Image (spheres, rainbow, N blue to C red):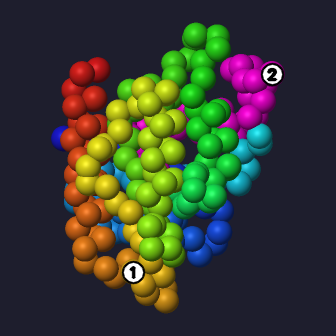
Amino acid sequence: MTASKIIAISGSLRADSHNTQLLRAAQKFNPGGLDIEIYEDLRDIPPYDMDLDTPERRPAVVAELRRRVLEADGLLIATPEFNYSIPGVLKNALDWLSTDWTKTEGLPLHRKPTAILGAAPTNFGTVRAQLALRQVFVWTNSDVVVKPEVHVFRSHERFDGDGNLTDQVTIDLLQGLLSELRSKAEAARDRS
């Protein structure tokens, strides 16, 4: 069977982000059956503007992200926690992905198999951010992996100086999450 294509988005713009490192760890510890591609252009997405949200007027970077998510079998999102919620840049990208005002293109997030995880240096990790993100995916009717939850708390203790995930419990949870995402992606492909 062909590997499921997964678009992975880090909600952090920081160069040494633990969330981006978490996505690299997902590539490294992939349990198989997934082709995980990390999205690199979050910084370039302009603020959401409904006046520009048509196939003819969308900024090229937005059109490309929408195309990639529509074509992907699933989505993997690593979110930091800002002010008890998700970062504005991540919410902004999801806003661009949640629409189809012309009803001609399809909704990129509709029924899209999606897995959420996150890392933060605090004692609670990204619990509240992931909860806020799950609320967004209720509206978009995305097919979110419910368990296992991957809240990498005290993340600075779980990566080495080169950004490699070294905590075995976190690796096991990550692989469990990816296995569930693979199952959802395969089931969605079988339905289509």
Q: Amino acid at mark 2?
A: Asp
- In-image side of 186 versus 61 (left or right): left
Q: Is residue 57 magenta?
A: yes
Can you tell which quarter of the image residue 81 is in?
A: bottom right
Mark 1 vs 2: CB contact within 8 A: no
Residue range in magenta is 48-77
Residue displayed at 72% across by 45% down: 45
Per the image, the residue denoted by label 2 is 51
Q: Secondary structure at mark 1?
A: loop
Q: Is residue 125 above or below residue 140?
A: below
Picture coordinates of residue 112, whole percent (x, y): 40, 32
Name the image quarter holding the N terminus: top left
Confirm whether residue 40 shows in the render: no
Q: Considering depth in this image, is 76 or 121 the residue closer to the camera?
A: 121
Per the image, the residue denoted by label 1 is 158
Picture coordinates of residue 99, whole percent (x, y): 60, 23
Query: Residue furthest toward the right?
Result: 51
Q: Secondary structure at mark 2?
A: helix
Query: Residue furthest toward the bottom?
Result: 161
Picture coordinates of residue 20, whole percent (x, y): 52, 65
Q: Is residue 54 above or below residue 46?
A: above
